[in-house]
Image: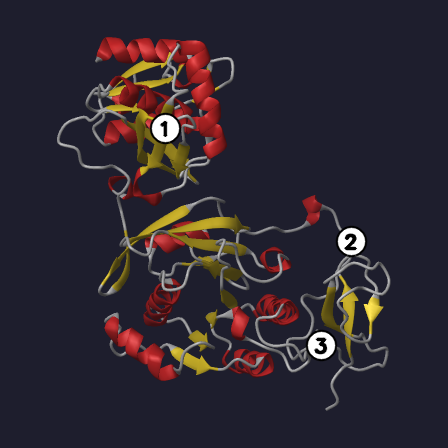
Amino acid sequence: MAKDKTIYTCNDCGGISPKWLGKCPHCNAWNTLVESIAESHAPVKNRYSSQFQSLAKASEVTTLSDIDATDMSRTPTGHEELDRVLGGGIVEGGVVLIGGDPGIGKSTLLLQALDSLQRAGQSTLYVTGEESGAQIALRSRRLGLDGSQVQVLAEIQLEKILATLDHIRPTIAVIDSIQTVYSDQLTSAPGSVAQVRECAAHLTRAAKASGVCIVLVGHVTKEGALAGPRVLEHMVDTVLYFEGDTHSSFRLVRAIKNRFGAVNEIGVFAMTEKGLKGVSNPSAIFLSQHSEPVPGSCVMVTLEGTRPLLVEIQALVDSGGPSPRRLSVGLDRDRLAMLLAVLHRHTGVACMDQDVFVNAVGGVRISEPAADLAVMLAIASSLRGKALPKGFIAFGEVGLAGEVRPAPRGQERLKEAAKLGFSVAIVPKANAPKKNDKAFEGLTIHAVERIEEALNLVRSLG
């Protein structure tokens, strides 16, 4: 069968060139030509009309109220933390993209999930393009998955993978990885922008048409972003990122995009000799075990998706040179500079000649402004050399005018702190409970409106 004609299309102006050039002959932009395939006008099947036929049957225009909408059924994977991130489990016809650093545990987690689904009676398929079938079998034995009946296919040609999916029709198929898959319709190497985009488009159409849930494993760049075209993340239904330090035994799986569940939901896993195990109480990871309170430490309650987590914020203020440093790990550095200015202007706590280092314990990244109050109290504690009271927590956003703004879902944060045995809380006034609630028993709650009130209250409690 003759191949379609290869052309090169400009990403900027859409101009077409019969061969690759460094500069577009139409708009003179450099390095914008991308390999693609010329559309044929002959009445033959194009590259999108595979054995799966079309994405869906043609339908007439209708109103939203007339459409019979039913909730998508979900199949649990057998791993509670993974199900939490996915929104309850895998969805028929769903496409999931999961990325992370090499060796962080992507293939391990997916192999464990496939084995659990297979033992629950589901048909599964693991397509490997980076390892042989023998390597996958050795890994399954190391993970203690003896007698696993997960089907394995070592293949990187897209057309053969699609034919296998059409023949087996599994409940879920893992493609490890999308950067190794290539199509005969393109002459570029596997992993190129054109190949990744084309192969992902075909696999997405196959999933929607056949009802097979497809999980794509993606490589990441040295900056930590998913490698390949940005359109790859737009095509799929769910985007998951593996986070965590390879020197630590804990891993976080975060949902960046999810059409079937909550965004920014996280699953917490611990790497063991038998693979990844879910952590039922993740707050214990992010809290350092101090026998007595230490200066510069303040615990806050942050929200990750629907889950409240207690995280310890540590600050170290030390005398600096002519150019004091401001460094933060797990928190926004620009926001740290802003909080130091607010601290000086409204409370008189000056750090102009001090180095300030702030860290979120456990490798978690906190992006919400509700961490402001805890960061400022930790800095003030370190500067004074006096620890905050035992069992103390704080959360709340601090504005440039020194006001303490409420944090979303404050009641849930306080309930989580009370459940874990914390006894003193400083929170925004709008987040304080309106009446006595048994859920907050044992927790003394102090409501403040300004940062000055919070610092004065801490001094009186200390």
Q: Residue furthest left?
A: 291
List x then y, in percent, for residue 276.
29, 60
Write the residue at 20% across / 26% down.
294
Which residue corresponds to mark 2?
61
Which dot, 2 or 3, sits closer to the camera?
Answer: 3
Which residue type carries mark 2?
Val
User: Quarter holding the C terminus?
Assistant: top left
Reading the image, the residue beneath label 1 is 356
**Sequence-first disc among 3 and 1:** 3
- Rendered position, 340 above or below 68: above
Residue 417 in the image: x percent, y percent?
28, 29
Question: What residue is drawn where x is 50% and y is 18%?
Answer: 399
* Residue 324 screen position, x and y as percent: 40, 28
Q: Closest to the observer: 393 or 298?
A: 298
Q: Nearer the viewer, residue 401 or 109?
A: 401
Mark 2 secondary-structure assignment: loop
Q: Are marks 3 and 1 in contact (CB under 8 Å)?
A: no
Residue annotated with mark 3 = 47
Instruction: Decide: is 174 above or below 363.
Output: below
Q: Residues within 10 Å of mark 3 (few under 14, many from 20)?
A: few
Amino acid, disc 1: Val
In the depicted view, which residue is nearer to us: 200 or 16?
A: 16
